[in-house]
Image (tube, rainbow, N blue to C red):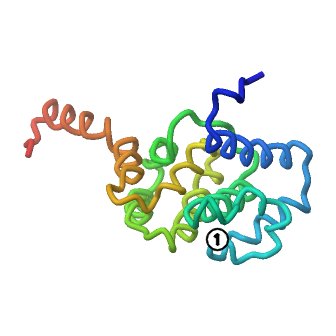
């Protein structure tokens, strides 16, 4: 049992939403998950049928970024509820499928460049690819990252980029040295 007295209200909110979504999946509440999936093709908050299930997590006092994160994460979770838990961020999840297709990297770059208002479109594509390849997702981390997507210093995008390309540079450098290729 976790000690909620040491958690911040923000942490309880995150754990509450993801815990609630996991509960729906465990109960196999197909109706609730179907209502949440209807938010996939729409900007967060536009699918009114989602409100009865997650409206309490998207209170106005928490701001538009939180509301976007609640609706988008819930719709994506409902789309891929059987995802196993990943310890990393979305960049590390996408890295696991990067070598399967040349378009993965291009799509990932488009996701990193996406505005918060277009994020639902790019994340739906990426979660679809992860689902098709049974790659785990860290839903709590994704929720936090979506909420912080519009931060001025773009720390979420930089973190995902480091997770995706971080060790790849070292491998390429080692390959060019052993094959006699030029290093730039």
Q: In terms of secondary structure, where does tag 1 sit? A: loop
Q: Nearer the viewer, residue 61 or 25?
A: 61
Q: Give the position of the N terminus as an image quadrant.
A: top right
Q: Is residue 141 above or below residue 42?
A: above
Nearest the viewer among 52 and 33 is: 52
* Left or right: residue 126 compared with residue 91: right
Q: Residue 155, percent across and down? A: 37, 50
Q: Residue at x 90, y 49 (%)?
A: 28
Q: Residue at x 61, y 48 (%)?
A: 133
Question: Is residue 154 found left or right of 148 in the rendered image?
Answer: left
Mark 1 lies on residue: 44
Which residue occupies the foreground of this view, 17 or 124? 17
Q: Position of residue 93 (x, y in %)?
A: 52, 44
Asked which quadrant contains residue 62, the reply is bottom right
Image coordinates for residue 67, horizontal then vertical, percent: 63, 64
- Between 94 and 33, the one nearer to me in the picture: 33
Give the answer, above or below, for where 3 lies relative to 69: above
Q: Relative to 76, is 177 above or below? A: above
Height in image: 48 above or below 59?
Answer: below
Circle 1 crowding by C-alpha within 10 Å: few under 14, some 14–19, many from 20:
many
Q: Percent x, y for residue 156? A: 42, 51
Which residue is rendered at x = 48% and y = 55% of the image?
148
Q: Residue at x 45, y 56 (%)?
A: 101
């Amino acid at each position: 049992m976790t000690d909620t007295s040491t958690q911040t209200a923000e942490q309880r909110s995150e754990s509450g939403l993801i815990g609630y979504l996991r509960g729906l999946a465990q109960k196999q509440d197909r109706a609730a998950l179907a209502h949440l999936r209807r938010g996939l093709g729409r900007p967060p908050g536009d699918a009114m049928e989602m409100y009865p299930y997650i409206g309490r997590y998207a209170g106005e006092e928490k701001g538009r970024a939180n509301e976007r994160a609640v609706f988008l994460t819930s719709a994506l979770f409902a789309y891929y509820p059987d995802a196993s838990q990943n310890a990393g961020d979305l960049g590390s999840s996408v890295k696991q499928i990067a070598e399967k297709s040349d378009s993965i990297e291009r799509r990932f770059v488009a996701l990193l460049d996406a505005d918060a208002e277009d994020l639902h479109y790019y994340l739906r594509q990426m979660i679809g690819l992860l689902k098709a390849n049974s790659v785990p997702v860290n839903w709590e981390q994704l929720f936090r990252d979506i909420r912080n997507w519009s931060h001025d210093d773009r720390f979420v995008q930089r973190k995902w980029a480091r997770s995706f390309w971080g060790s790849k540079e070292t491998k390429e450098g080692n390959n060019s040295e052993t094959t006699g290729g030029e290093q730039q």
